[in-house]
């Protein structure tokens, strides 16, 4: 059973058919890596605004963060009022080279920021990225504690939370699939959440779907090319995914200021529409999560 607030906010994040078609521009370190070293915070904020503006009302939701884009881009009207807003909680994003047993891998929340403040600022959902392996001893335990605490705090607020377990120190394709599948299985037992999952490899999406149980999951692009992500999403939605949350595979080619407007108006828009068509064939989130509670004590009988 699902409380009314969470269910209502999930509907704001998804299409009428119940699919996640999310434009992700909440990147920080990974976005900076796409820009010249001289890029300023204002440059990043402007780019995020340009992407959102170009996409118009096509996304079901946008994924932004409080350092460069939230609530700046909701207050000034860049994000349409009718569009869902997902906001990041973690203080840091992707890290390039990490290995097992390193305690510095453990994520933390942004200082002075919380799910409660996020909700009070007008967001519809929280997102938590965690560098994650199911088999990394004390590091896994620390990440587990962080995920549990965020899931619990969001549940009390009737706020959807997207958990994004990003694998690291992968040995080969077999290890990749095993880590992603077992991480989804482990985290799905921590409470109500939407899982934002990297592609596990050919033929493995059905195992992710099984591991997710009653929880909906969406595919993230994780830095691959658009063509790769399109094919991955097709397989994921056929296996039961509820949509996508796409970042660099969507907008990477639009970074250059001199060609940005044209690339956004053509390539980026066309890509998003193609991905949305694929996502519409996935499993609606409401087919996985329980029905709404029927406890309406204020209603007339």
Image (cartoon, helix red, strand yellow):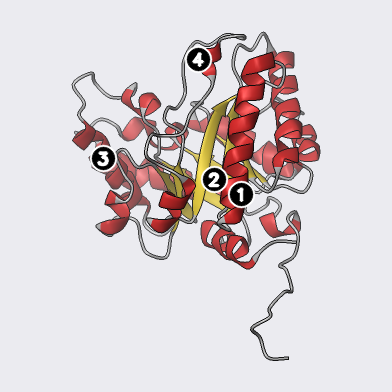
Q: Are marks 4 and 1 in contact (CB under 8 Å)?
A: no
Q: In this rendering, is residue 70 above or below 163?
A: below
Query: Mark 1 = which residue?
Result: 279
Label 4 vs label 1: CA separation? 36 Å
Label 2 vs label 4: CA separation? 35 Å
Q: Quadrant of the C terminus?
A: bottom right
Indicate the secondary structure of the residue bearing disc 3: helix
Residue toward you, 148 or 44? 148
Residue 286: % across, % down = 70, 59
Residue 43: % across, % down = 21, 34
Label 1 vs label 2: CA separation? 6 Å
Query: Mark 2 = which residue?
Result: 275
Horizontal relation, residue 3 to residue 178: left or right? left
Query: Mark 3 = which residue?
Result: 45
Q: What residue is rendered at 42% in x and 27% in y?
A: 92
- Say which of marks 4 and 3 sits in front: 4
Residue 122 shows up from this direction: no
User: Dividing the picture into quarters, in which one does residue 135 lie?
Assistant: top right
Indicate the secondary structure of the residue bearing disc 4: helix
Query: Mark 4 = which residue?
Result: 104
Q: Are marks 1 and 2 in contact (CB under 8 Å)?
A: yes
């Amino acid at each position: 059973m699902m409380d009314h607030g969470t269910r209502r906010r999930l509907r704001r994040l998804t299409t009428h058919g119940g699919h996640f078609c999310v434009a992700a521009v909440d990147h920080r370190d990974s976005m900076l890596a796409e820009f010249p070293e001289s890029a300023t915070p204002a440059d990043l904020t402007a780019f995020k605004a340009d992407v959102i503006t170009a996409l118009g009302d096509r996304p079901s939701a946008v994924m932004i963060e409080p350092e460069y884009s939230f609530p700046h881009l909701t207050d000034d009207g860049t994000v349409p009022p009718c569009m869902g807003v997902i906001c990041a909680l973690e203080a840091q994003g992707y890290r390039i080279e990490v290995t097992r047993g390193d305690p510095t891998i453990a994520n933390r929340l942004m200082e002075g920021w919380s799910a409660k403040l996020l909700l009070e600022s007008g967001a519809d959902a929280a997102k938590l990225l965690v560098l994650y392996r199911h088999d990394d001893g004390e590091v896994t335990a620390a990440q587990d504690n962080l995920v549990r605490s965020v899931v619990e705090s969001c549940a009390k607020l009737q706020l959807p939370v997207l958990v994004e377990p990003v694998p690291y120190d992968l040995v080969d394709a077999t290890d990749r699939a095993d880590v992603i599948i077992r991480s989804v299985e482990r985290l799905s037992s921590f409470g109500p959440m939407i899982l934002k999952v990297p592609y596990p490899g050919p033929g493995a999406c059905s195992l992710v779907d099984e591991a997710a149980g009653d929880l909906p999951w969406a595919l993230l692009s994780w830095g691959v090319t658009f063509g790769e992500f399109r094919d991955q999403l097709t397989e994921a939605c056929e296996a039961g995914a509820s949509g996508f949350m796409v970042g660099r595979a969507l907008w990477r080619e639009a970074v250059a200021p001199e060609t940005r407007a044209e690339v956004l108006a053509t390539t980026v828009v066309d890509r998003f529409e193609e991905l949305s068509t694929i996502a519409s064939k996935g499993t609606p989130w409401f087919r996985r999560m329980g029905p709404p509670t029927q406890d309406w004590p204020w209603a007339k009988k």
